[in-house]
Image (cartoon, grey):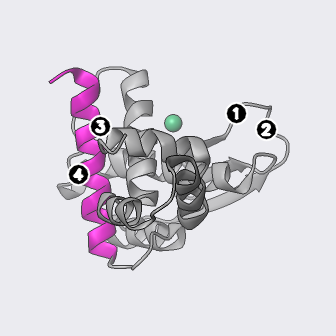
Amino acid sequence: MKEYEIINANAERVATAIYDGIGDTMPSILSLVRWTEENFGIKIEIRFWDTLRDGHSGFVYPDPKSGIYKIGINSKEIDYRQRFTQCHELAHIIRNVGLKYGLSCGETFSAKGTERFCERFAAAFLMPAEIFIHEWKTIREPELFKKVRLASFFKVSGEAVRYRAKELGLT
Ligand SMILES: [Zn+2]
């Protein structure tokens, strides 16, 4: 397996385990925040900024004074993108703090590898494989319409659906 394939597989494994652990019928970011706070004994604060430069979707850092993990989201981006970014930033926290609690996200050997993990985590959490495959096979429409339907079903971008379908070997 190539390094990126291992990272993708780890992101899929961790996102699935957390989604299953939460037990919601559809992925919810609020649940993911609560799960992370409760399981790791930390506090997370998400704020939306309209002052971030274009192309800068979000950031996360632990505030040394309060001990709170602060997530910032670029509110000028479309809703779907903001949802994805929130999951991406939460993945950074889960990677950093999780190991202390026995949750291994696998090693990444570069900043790029870590970013890949967080992107794939967000995709796998927001579009759980089992539901995605089920919906994909249930919707009897040409592929283009199917992708549009799935994007609104999962509240993600069309591009995210396209990538996910490919990743799950459906196209
Ligand atoms: Zn990142």
Can residue 12 be found in the magenta stretch?
yes
**SS of the residue at dot 1?**
loop
Characterize the magenta stretch by its predominant secondary structure. helix
Residue 23, visible in the rendered structure: yes
**SS of the residue at dot 3?**
helix
Q: Residue 45, percent across and down? A: 61, 62
Residue that numbered label 2 is attached to: 52
Of mark 3 and mark 2, the one earlier in the sequence is: 3
* 130 or 72, nearer to the observer: 130
Question: Looking at the image, is 141 positioned above or below residue 59?
Answer: below
Question: Looking at the image, is 75 positioned above or below residue 32?
Answer: above
Viewer-nearest of discs 1 and 3: 3
**SS of the residue at dot 2?**
loop
Q: Which residue is rendered at x = 24% and y = 62% of the image?
A: 17
Q: What separation in Å lies between label 3 and label 4 (alpha carbons)?
A: 9 Å
Residue that numbered label 3 is attached to: 8
Q: What separation in Å lies between label 1 and label 4 (alpha carbons)?
A: 27 Å
Q: Which mark, by number, is residue 56?
A: 1
Residue that numbered label 4 is attached to: 13
Viewer-nearest of discs 1 and 4: 4
In the picture, measured across the screen, residue 104 lies left or right of residue 22, that is: left
Asked whether the beta carbons under mark 2 and mark 1 sit within 8 Å of each other, the answer is yes
Q: What separation in Å lies between label 3 and label 2 (alpha carbons)?
A: 28 Å
**SS of the residue at dot 4?**
helix
Amino acid tagged 4: Arg
